[in-house]
Amino acid sequence: MCFSYTQIVFNIPRGTRDFTPEDMQKRRYLEKSMSDTFNSFGYGEVQTPMFENLDLFTAKSGEGIIDEIYSFPDKGGRNLALRPELTAPVMRFYVEKMQMEPKPLKLFYFGNCFRYDRPQKGRYREFMQAGCELIGTNTPEAQAELIAMAYKLLENAGLKTITLSIGNLNILSVLFEKLGLSKENQKYLTPLIDKSQFEDVYDALVDFNVKPKDATAFLEILQSSDVEKISEYLKDNEIVKKELNDLKIITGLLENAFDVKDYEIKMSIVRGLDYYNGLVFEIEAPCLGAEKQLCGGGAYDLIELFGGRESPTSGFAIGFDRTLIALETEGYKFTIPQLDAYLISVNEDVLEKTLEIAQMLRKQKITTDVDLLRRGIGKSLKYASSINAKKAIIVGPKELEQDSVTIKNMETGDQEIVKIKDIVSKIK
Ligand code: AMP
């Protein structure tokens, strides 16, 4: 008889990744470090579904977002979307179930997000964000704490070189108004400003009939980190006065209370101009090159849009995957946990006893693995060494007669006979 079949090889979908046990240890390390930092600032963790009704995201970002996300009708004809970010879902959750909670409400999350992005290093179609929302306050101290927490999340995780930029969209709006730009023209300019394509901004301004002298002055302010200069340029505007005064308090607190001294004032930070409404900030890891933005955040208005009662909100999202790449690029030494003990039974007669000892060790929180292949002492020791076990425990009939086993230190090669009752203390 002759069988013929075509072998099918299944590939991982474009822009997604599989994670090995070693990858997962690094990811868990970062998750633990970040959740410890969130907790240390009094934040509580939340989780929302991986898919939402599509209109949640179109309400926040407009119909244009449909081209950038994964959306589909389900079998009941509902239009759903895999979440591209978590601010809208968390705000939906807040409006549905948490509006009565005492304020301020401090929520953090980890979650995978999905975007129909063009994949490259640091840009995926499935990626993870770590982020938070602060609901019920917009005092300068709240905003300073928020920015400081974003900075500390990255610093505490082990990153050495990050750059923090702080901007303000209310000031940017006043700058636009001063030039008499229509909303449509502003919309055209914002992506150019976001990408720091200032020559293109200049050309567009001139096309929009802005006098070259005014366009130059605008661009100078946009690229200036000098608060006094910005203040002088927009001195008659009350909104600007208040925002700059708050900015001074925020930066003072960052420097003196939170020890965050490296930052830059940058009015060219744009972000989602539609719902951000004042403070905005970004943190980058210069070592990452093109996809260097690790974190983006600020103050925004979404609650009323989602049918809730007005309350000031701010938050940020950190690219979890990029943070890991940045740590690796900087040469961060991840501690990979080692297996404490690898048990080898000399023959089948002592198998049950070997498994029993393994269980006893696990109960004592000693990480333990056992030879499950019956492959003999030599090969098992080789395997124990390949998985980087600290100790090998050889269980043989002769030693068992004395209620003992042989423990081999895999680093030094030293061997000793130890009573079963003393294994735990010997290994700990
Ligand atoms: P955003 O919600 O666009 O402000 O993104 C917040 C952070 O998520 C960014 O600063 C990036 O670090 C990260 N991020 C955004 N899009 C992607 C992506 N496609 N792949 C990996 N990380 C991303």
Image: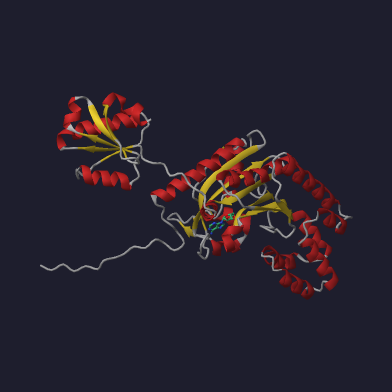
Ligand 1 is found in the corner quadrant, namely: bottom right
Give the position of the C terminus as an image quadrant. top left
Query: Residue 117: x percent and y percent?
Result: 53, 63
Q: Is residue 368 above or below residue 58?
A: above
Residue 234 image-quadrant placement: bottom right
Q: Is residue 400 above or below residue 19?
A: above
| Residue at x 81%, y 53% (from the top left corner) | 227
Q: Is residue 222 above or below residue 335?
A: below
Q: Is residue 411 above or below residue 69?
A: above
> Is residue 80 visible in this depiction of the protein?
no
Give the position of the N terminus as an image quadrant. bottom left
| Residue at x 81%, y 69% (from the top left corner) | 216
Left/right of residue 216 with respect to residue 276 in the rendered view: right
Residue 282 image-quadrant placement: bottom right
Query: Residue 157: x percent and y percent?
Result: 56, 45
Query: Residue 9: x percent and y percent?
Result: 31, 64
